[in-house]
Image (tube, grey):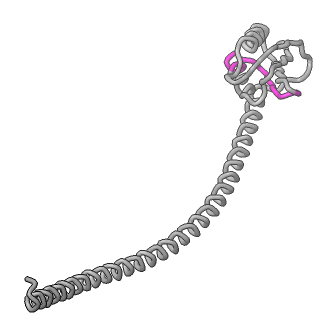
């Protein structure tokens, strides 16, 4: 069995799912050991296996990347240290991924709690606005009632004016008729007809 230390370098090689990506291929190739971790801005991979499997694994790493990775260089070195058994690595990776899921879930719950508090605050403000709108509508209703009363009084005044006008016209017509009759009578008496 041989061991290799592989460094994956690039502008984006962390937080792209590299460890799980590597595990699937190492398992498919039958590697005996695997370890991957972030070192600085790089991903460090320790692998152990038969020479032909190791060569395939290194070739895979050089030619394939996780979907969102931006790899610039892959460096391969011989390695003499201890490499974690692949089954143990799998368990470690699983626990780590579950911990990330729990953290993400807790973050979502915390965010959801904040959103619910903001929503509650907004609902209270909305309730206040609705109360103010109701008050404004009541005031508008009162204004409309007063306007209706004013219009009713205007209509009454207009009707009174019309009646007064009719009465005045009748009075004036009668008065003019009387004046004309008196003028006619005067003209007849003085002989101007």
Q: Residue furthest right?
A: 80
x 70%, y 15%: residue: 64
| 139 is higher (above) or lower (below) than 62 | below
Is residue 112 shown left or right of residue 133?
right
Residue 151 in which image quadrant: bottom left
| 54 is higher (above) or lower (below) than 43 | above
- The front one of 149 and 32 is 149
Q: Horizontal and vertical percent for residue 89?
A: 77, 29
Residue 128 in which image quadrant: bottom right
Is residue 165 shown left or right of residue 11?
left
- The front one of 11 and 43 is 11
x 77%, y 17%: residue: 71
x 73%, y 45%: residue: 103
Is residue 113 shown left or right of residue 153?
right
- The front one of 74 and 71 is 71
Residue 42 in which image quadrant: top right
Magenta residues (range) = 25-40
Q: Horizontal and vertical percent for residue 24?
A: 68, 23
Q: Horizontal and vertical percent for residue 68?
A: 69, 24
Q: Quadrant of the N terminus?
A: top right
């Amino acid at each position: 069995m041989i061991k290799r230390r592989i460094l994956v370098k690039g502008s984006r090689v962390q937080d792209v799912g590299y460890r799980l990506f590597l595990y699937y291929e190492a398992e498919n190739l039958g590697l005996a050991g695997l370890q991957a971790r972030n070192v600085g801005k790089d991903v460090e991979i320790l692998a152990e296996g038969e020479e032909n499997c190791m060569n395939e694994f290194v070739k895979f790493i050089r030619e394939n990347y996780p979907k969102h990775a931006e790899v610039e260089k892959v460096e391969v070195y011989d390695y003499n240290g201890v490499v974690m058994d692949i089954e143990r690595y799998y368990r470690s990776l699983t626990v780590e991924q579950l911990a990330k899921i729990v953290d993400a879930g807790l973050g979502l719950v915390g965010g959801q709690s904040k959103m619910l508090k903001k929503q509650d605050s907004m609902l209270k403000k909305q309730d206040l606005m609705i109360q103010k709108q109701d008050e404004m509508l009541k005031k508008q209703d009162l204004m409309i009632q007063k306007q209706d009363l004013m219009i009713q009084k205007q209509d009454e005044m207009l009707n009174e004016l019309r009646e007064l006008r009719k009465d005045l016209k009748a009075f004036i017509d009668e008065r003019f008729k009387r004046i004309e009759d008196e003028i006619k009578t005067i003209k007849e008496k003085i002989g101007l007809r």
